[in-house]
Image (cartoon, grey):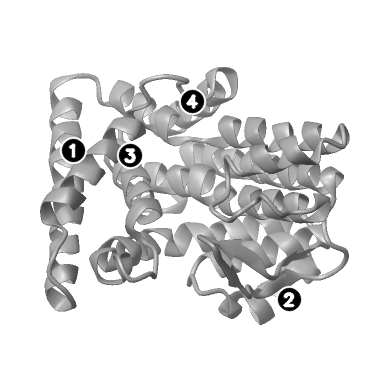
Amino acid sequence: MLSTLTLFAAVTLDALLGEPRRYHPLVGFGRLAVWLEQVLYGGEGADRALRGGLALALALLPLLLAVLLLRVWTFAWLVDLILLTLALGGSSLYRHAMAVVEALSAHDLALARERVGWIVSRDTTELDEQGVARATCESVLENGNDAVFGAIFWFLLLGGPGVLIYRLSNTLDAMWGYRNERYRDFGWAAARWDDLLNWAPARLTALSYALVGKSRTAVRCWREQAHRHASPNAGAVMAAGAGALGLRLGGAAIYHGQLEERPVFGEGEPPGAEDIVRCLRLVRVSLLLWLAVAMLWGLFGLRWFPWSFPIA
């Protein structure tokens, strides 16, 4: 039950405070990752992949050990609360997406392009209003898993250490997980590790979107379209989310100066500004569902699941 209360407290703190505007720990971790890359990058093929795996281990294991020791020497619940609050990005996601909505509503396309560029990796300079709305909707649905539900899943399973490893691994994948010449081998371990950690959360996120949206359409799109995505996890989230909202997402986009033909997900009309709000609502209602399940788990989990054990 303590873990459930910690979860509710972290979600509340994220909603009230959002992410730290300055000195966010992930910024410092990103600098550590850059330094490790500078020191270890080299070789080619299997040698470069081995160096990437070593960089992954050196980035994660010392911090994991530090957190485990903190939980022994101090209050474990407090360490977990801080870690989960810092890992959750729901408030930040809402704020950034609504900034795009405001720009589109004011018909300021230049500002909308700039603001969507804060949350996506694609080139936004040539996007029209529909393209801006589509990119924002895709980011909201995917980050619902990465910045909210994935963190909650690993917290409920393994407490603070679990959410720490998940969030840091997600950051390393964002930095090293590209399939280009520089990172294809060096980032292989980080990308595959992140895929492994996200396998269950992504499917639970997709299921959540289906349950609170257009369920039949979401499940059908998930079943028929998820395999189209290059990621083994993002496809499930994107297809189910687009289907749940009756939207058509995906398609061609410019990434790192290259036009890429991405698969289409969902069905219906392309999104507009109002659909960004619908995507945010889908994530929020899904979060309420997760919180309800977590409360039931906290109240009755040990009775329903004899193998369950307290994690904090």
Measured in 3D between alpha carbons, the distance from the residue under mark 3 to the one under mark 4, in whole angstroms, is 20 Å
**Which three-letter amino acid code belongs to the residue tagged 1?**
Leu
Distance of mark 2 from mark 3, alpha carbons?
A: 34 Å
> Sequence order check: which comes first, mark 1 or mark 2?
1
Mark 1 sits on what residue?
63
Distance, label 1 to label 4, CA atoms, is 20 Å
The residue wearing badge 3 is: 159
- Amino acid type at image mark 3: Gly
**Dot 1, crowdedness within 10 Å: few (<14), some or many (≥20)?**
some
Position in image of residue 293 (x %, y %): 57, 44
Q: Residue at coordinates 33% horizontally, 71% vertically from top-left?
A: 181
* Mark 3 or mark 4: whose residue is earlier in sequence: 4
Compared to residue 102, the image places residue 259 above or below, namely below
Q: Are marks 3 and 4 in contact (CB under 8 Å)?
A: no
Q: Is residue 120 left or right of residue 268?
A: left
Mark 4 belongs to which amino acid?
A: Glu
